[in-house]
Amino acid sequence: MTDRFSFALHATDGAARTGLISTPRGGIRTPAFMPVGTAATVKAMLPGSVRQTGADILLGNTYHLMLRPGAERVARLGGLHRFMNWDRPILTDSGGFQVMSLASLRKLTEEGVTFASHIDGSKHMLSPETSMEIQRLLGSDIVMAFDECPALPADRARIEESMRLSMRWAQRSRDAFGDRPGHALFGIQQGGLEPDLREESAEALTGIGFDGYAIGGLAVGEGQEAMFACLDHAPGALPVDKPRYLMGVGKPDDIVGAVKRGVDMMDCVLPSRSGRTGQAWTRRGQVNLRNARHADDPRPLDAACTCPACTGYSRAYLHHVVRAGEMIAGMLLTWHNLHYYQELMGGMRDAIAAGRFAAWEAGFHAARAEGDIERL
Ligand SMILES: [Zn+2]
């Protein structure tokens, strides 16, 4: 155990990296996938079950938690870890991205963003200072700087203006965060798909100095090819000795491509959200358990998977509970999907440590190319 936040890089293979983030609440093996616990819960999962899938850290959403149940209330009840019964590290986003995607009546100024809650229409304000305060009240271990993320496509002038505003907000976030040993503040690189703006943003953030650096403004509709083209240079502009976090990514092949390009941390609602709609992710790609082909299939979803859904149930049962709208469908498939995502991360960590990432990646794509097992 440590009383400080730190990052140790253990091995690299090409641009891919593996290491360990140390925090007072435990270590985070990288590359790391962070399940999303939007409203202080990873939907359909107990915290102990999330841990059993191999997750070292969860993500919480500032926007949702400030509106309901409220950051002051969470603080009075002992902080987010105690409130949701997860004692390991938590990263909270700044609220900026979700204000832009969920709130109404938004008004953006140099000071921050005023908006109306999507729940009850009540008026709120988020700024670098209020975001830092809310994340402090929640007790987040990794706090994200408050930024603005324009939806793509946007013209260069808009992206440039937005990035520079985010850099001014990054400085204000740093000032408001202050010195909090054991807690980390991450800056967020912006600049859309423009290499020179990504460079300028990285320079500004490095000048301010953060404990880690996120790559923001991707996975917002630009497509995988454009995202990878950006990731061919964006992570390399950030300090080599700090964790790099790609926000909101993604599908398994997005994650593999991002790790290959030097990303250390990712989060996405996909494995949990798709688990609630009958979608499973396996080594051989995506499986829709709603499909009638599974109705009489006694085989497990993935015979090689050790999760409860695969060791205890048939495809026929999963199909039945998905079709019947039973709660256990979301529980089992969320568990399987999170388990699969964590195995994916573990496989990459081992491959990078052994210097065989290229061979691992070839195997990953070959298994997916095979597709799901033949129907009976
Ligand atoms: Zn499974």
Image: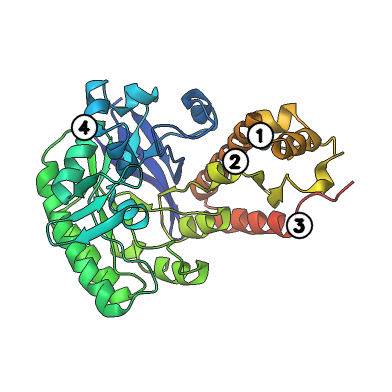
Q: Position of residue 194 (x, y in %)?
A: 33, 75
Check whether the beta carbons of the residues at disc 3 and disc 4 lie within 8 A of each other. Answer: no
Q: Which residue is mark 2?
A: 276
CA separation, marks 3 and 4? 48 Å
Q: Position of residue 133 (x, y in %)?
A: 17, 39
Few, some or many C-alpha atoms within 10 Å of disc 4 (few <14, some 14-19, many ≥20)?
many
Element at label 3: helix
Q: Which residue is mark 1?
A: 329
CA separation, marks 3 and 1? 26 Å
Q: Which residue is mark 4?
A: 137
Q: As drawn, which residue projects farthest toward the front? A: 121
Residue name at image x 35 percent, y 66 percent: 234
Q: Position of residue 191 (x, y in %)?
A: 29, 69
Question: Is residue 320 among what the camera can see?
Answer: yes
The tag earlier along the polypeptide, 3 or 1, is: 1
CA separation, marks 2 and 1? 7 Å
CA separation, marks 2 and 4? 31 Å
Residue name at image x 90 percent, y 46 percent: 376
Q: Looking at the picture, tell me which residue is in the foreground, 71 or 90.
A: 71
Disc ID at residue 370: 3
